Image: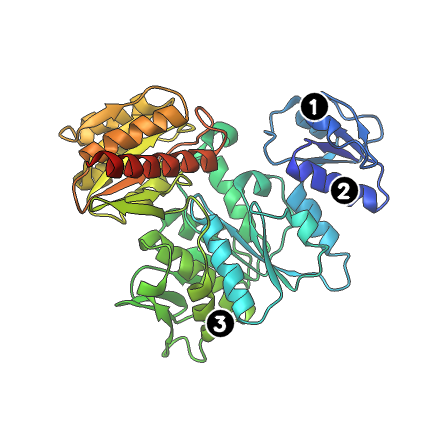
Amino acid sequence: MLVAGAGVTGRSAVRALTERGARVTVTDGNAERLAELDGLGAELVPGLTEPPAGTDLVVTSPGWRPTAPLLVASAAAGVEVIGDVELAWRASRDLPNPATWLAVTGTNGKTTTVGMLESMLRAGGAHALACGNIGLPVLDAVFEGYEVLAVELSSFQLHWSSTLAPHASVVLNLAEDHLDWHGSMESYAAAKGTIHAHSNVVVHNADDPWSVRLAGEYAPAGAKRVGFRLDTPRPGELGLVEDLLIDRAYGPDPQHSAEELISATEVRPTGPHNLANALAAAALARAYGIDPGGVAKGLREFQPGAHRAVEVGEFGGVRYVNDSKATNPHAAAGSLLAHSSVVWIAGGQLKGAAVDELVEAVAGRLRGAVLMGADAPVIAAALARHAPDVPVHRVASGDDEAMNEAVSVASDLAQPGDVVLLAPAGASLDMFRNYAHRGDAFADAVLARATGSADDGR
């Protein structure tokens, strides 16, 4: 077997395969990273562009594009190419008591939803773990003896999966993202839709046309269909009635009865997009058999992850919120729409996504905008078209120094009652190590500014 890629998932695949007696070769273009796998029992060969003779399976890391020469050559030679998630699924079927999978994908909200789901499952008494594109690789998780797995799946991982059959699955939403990898919106959507292809329960977001479409196109015959919406739920759906999350899909009589889950005011993080995440997680938890009490307890106990709509502090009547994880326009829109008056810190790598729709939707909420990163000019042009009266400031490239300037300018633009919001709408790698580094830089800059303001009397 050949493992393509020596990163986190590659290491997981090598360990799982060699421990079970497989003969494994590993390749990666980064010789230093490849050397870190020395001692795992695999042959290490840098820079392969064709599979070695006798290769019967290629397990690729999710970041490798389908156009990579090695993967193209493998397919041409008739060698099956799969990802670590597909390998994990196949391996789990050979276990005496395999875990049940509840699978989550979508452009935005995956990590929050999976975290909420894990909390609900545990509150309901299940031996559960969140894994996949978050935390522990799913290939490691399947051998740990859990009863149920809350699995976050990216479009890259799903592209390389073919037999995956979770008990329940959801596509939270879909918007332009990773088009540089998939090549088109249709291809991106097709990868996401495969999560439903063999599911028993197919959950969709009734407020998102793509989610509805993919559930319709990919749900297998006989699968239970469950919707969720930020409005009064219809029979077979979860939704909102005034400020209550309501289940009309899993009760004793979904046609005529409704079960209360929790008040919307108790859901954290705040914002309509996070209420949608909570409803999606509840739909999956209920599909597994968690009762309404477990759903409510899980939501109350859920602790949001770092850099996801986290309030850094309030200084001079201005709140500072770190949503560095908003790495595409759709995520940034959800974050911005949660506040009425915002000084927006944005920018980074848009990965081919358009921002005009985002800017047009939030223009009336913007007190000002501070832009940084590679695609700052694209966002600036959209602001000029759709929000010409909003003050816009561009900061120079760099990391911590640039963020310090961004926070300083944003603070000067803000007035009491405003929110200074880092919701970049782009990836971070043009200026920072990752979105966490960017979020930490924002938090550090905010706290430094607050301390400095207190010291000099401002």
> In the rendering, at what x and y percent does residue 107 appear?
44, 43
Secondary structure type for disc 3: helix
Instruction: Give the amino acid at mark 3.
Output: Gly
Q: Which residue is mark 1?
A: 32
Q: Residue at x 27, y 47 (%)?
A: 314
Say few, some or many: other residues with alpha carbon within 10 Å of mark 1 (under 14 / 14 to 19 / 20 or more): few
Badge 1 or badge 3: first in the primary sequence: 1
Q: Report which quarter residue 442 is drawn in.
A: top left
Amino acid type, label 2: Arg
Residue 27 seen: no
In the displayed structure image, the side of residue 219 where residue 444 appears, left or right: left
Quadrant assignment for the C terminus:
top left
Between 322 and 317, the one lying in front of the other is 317
Between 363 and 182, the residue placed more toward the observer is 363
**Residue drawn at 23 percent across, 35 percent down:** 411
Q: Which residue is mark 2?
A: 15
Looking at the image, is mark 1 or mark 3 nearer the viewer? 1
Element type where label 1 sits in the image: helix
Which numbered dot is residue 294? 3
For residue 259, above or below residue 325: below
Residue 360 on image: x %, y %: 22, 36
